[in-house]
Amino acid sequence: MIEFHFKSDLVISNTSDYADWVNRIIKSEGLEAGQIDYVFCTDEYLLQLNQEYLNHNTFTDIITFDYTDGKTISGDIFISTERVEENAKKYKVDVLNELRRVMSHGILHLAGYGDKSDDEIKRMREKEDEKIKMFHVEP
């Protein structure tokens, strides 16, 4: 089950469209969805998690806690909506497009993709682009 929790000003009204999209991402990787919780929060909220659980004292756009078991992916995905908005401005992209990039990024981490080396980062970006294109809402 995919659930959305809002602890910032950003609220997605069409959560069922997003849940459907996330499910399609997971299936496209040959995996099954377990419990996935997206928490949309502020910079400060995410910074506190970063300090407490990862010993990092930096702002970030996403932190993913992985509870995957075999082919069933589960996890908590925390997204700073302030970072998403800043990144959208920085990279001159639509905020919702950047939000989808970060949302897919979390799922890709749960699916086993990394982003530490240059090669991993390149592959992650390709996968993010591929998954963003899968988002569509029928009129």
Image: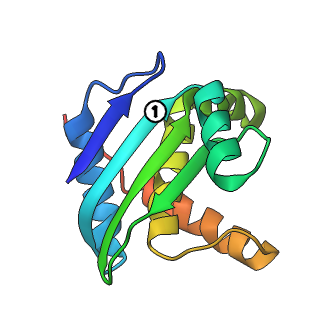
Count of all numbered marks drawn on residues in the image: 1
Mark 1: which secondary structure? strand
Q: Is residue 2 above or below residue 30?
A: above
- Residue at 54 percent of width and 47 percent of height: 102
Residue 95 in percent (x, y) is at 56, 30
Residue ranking furthest to the top:
9
Q: Is residue 131 above or below residue 81?
A: below
- Residue at 60 percent of width and 36 percent of height: 46
Q: Is residue 119 above or below residue 54?
A: below
User: In the figure, is residue 3 to the left or right of 57?
Assistant: left
> 42 and 91: which one is in front?
42
Residue 17 in percent (x, y) is at 24, 41
Q: Name the amino acid, label 1.
A: Phe
User: In the figure, is residue 95 to the left or right of 39?
Assistant: right
Residue 82 in percent (x, y) is at 62, 25
Q: Quadrant of residue 94?
A: top right
Mark 1, residue position = 40
Residue 6 in percent (x, y) is at 38, 26
Identify the image quadrant of the N terminus: bottom left
> 74 and 133: which one is in front?
74
Q: Does the rendering let one see residue 137?
A: no
- Residue at 34 percent of width and 32 percent of height: 5
- Residue at 44 percent of width and 73 percent of height: 111
Q: Does the rendering let one see residue 12?
A: yes
User: In the figure, is residue 2 to the left or right of 52?
Assistant: left
Q: Quadrant of residue 139?
A: top left
- Tell me the colour scheme of the image: rainbow
Q: Is residue 80 above or below residue 60?
A: above
How busy is the neighbourhood of tag 1: few (under 14 within 10 Å), some, or many (20 plus)? Answer: many
